[in-house]
């Protein structure tokens, strides 16, 4: 079943800082888990230990849209980082730029990462900090993020954008949906047939 992702709406969470890497998002000690269950509770756990982290503040506990700065998700390629963010409750990430592998891992789980100009990011982060209940809307069709009657342009590459709008971002789901065709093809491949 295809899940179209055209629009994500909800409160935002401002996370200020450049080059926030995947080890900060989810430390390496959590990579031993067989499943991704429980990772949402551990997102930014080491940063949160110092207290007053946005992911701990009551005002942001219902946030759906994470607003970040430059080169977010750099570092190792761990897919646990987007999983932890999504399992905490984030459904879209808006930032100045993203590490390529992090971006791809987000697409694989249906979390759009869209870019905006640094001035727009700063305005959004200040708006959310001042009014945490403000509803943001990331619209992939119009390529805008909207809040309080204002709109800022966002960018996402045409391929990923089309995948979200058509519901084809879920590669595993597409394979499962085509299982009969795959089995039919597999039966015709000589190297998959065992002869005695």
Image (cartoon, rainbow, N blue to C red):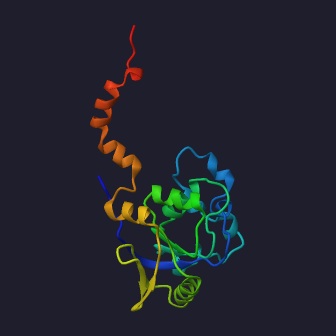
Please tell me which residue lies in front, 5 or 196. 196
Left or right of residue 71: residue 6: left
Q: Residue furthest top?
A: 196
Horizontal side of 132 relative to 118 (left or right) equals left
Q: Residue at x 27, y 35 (%)?
A: 180
- Residue 39, above or below 9: above
Give how far across and how far down residue 171 sits, in percent. 40, 49
Check the picture and name the quadrant holding the C terminus.
top left
Q: Where in the figure is residue 4, as x and y percent of width and height?
A: 32, 63
Q: Identify the image quadrant of residue 134.
A: bottom left
Question: Between 87 and 173, which is closer to the camera in this rendering?
Answer: 173
Q: Is 39 in front, or is 91? A: 91
Give the x, y percent position of residue 3. Answer: 32, 59
Q: Is residue 147 visible?
A: yes
Quick check: can you spot residue 137? Answer: no
Task: Residue at 50% x, 85% y: name it.
Answer: 132
Residue 151 falls in which quadrant of the image? bottom left
Q: How many numbered marks have been drawn onto this rendered protein structure?
A: 0
Residue drawn at (66%, 70%), measured in percent from left and top? 48
Q: Residue at position x 52%, y 56% from top?
A: 105
């Amino acid at each position: 079943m295809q899940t179209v992702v055209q629009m994500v709406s909800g409160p935002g969470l401002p996370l200020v800082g450049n080059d926030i890497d995947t080890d900060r998002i989810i430390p390496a000690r959590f990579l031993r888990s067989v499943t991704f269950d429980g990772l949402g509770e551990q997102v930014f756990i080491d940063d949160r230990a110092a207290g007053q982290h946005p992911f701990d503040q009551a005002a942001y506990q219902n946030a759906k849209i994470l607003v970040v700065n430059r080169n977010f998700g750099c570092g190792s390629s761990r897919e646990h980082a987007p999983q932890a963010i999504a399992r905490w409750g984030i459904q879209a990430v808006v930032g100045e730029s993203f590490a390529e592998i992090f971006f791809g891992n987000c697409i694989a789980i249906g979390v759009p990462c869209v870019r905006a100009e640094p001035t727009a990011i700063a305005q959004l982060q200040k708006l959310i900090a001042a009014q945490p209940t403000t509803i943001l809307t990331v619209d992939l069709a119009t390529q805008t993020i909207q809040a309080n009657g204002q709109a800022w342009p966002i960018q996402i590459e045409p391929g990923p954008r089309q995948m979200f709008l058509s519901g084809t971002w879920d590669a595993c789901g597409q394979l499962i949906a085509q299982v009969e065709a795959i089995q039919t093809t597999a039966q015709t491949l000589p190297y998959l047939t065992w002869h005695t």
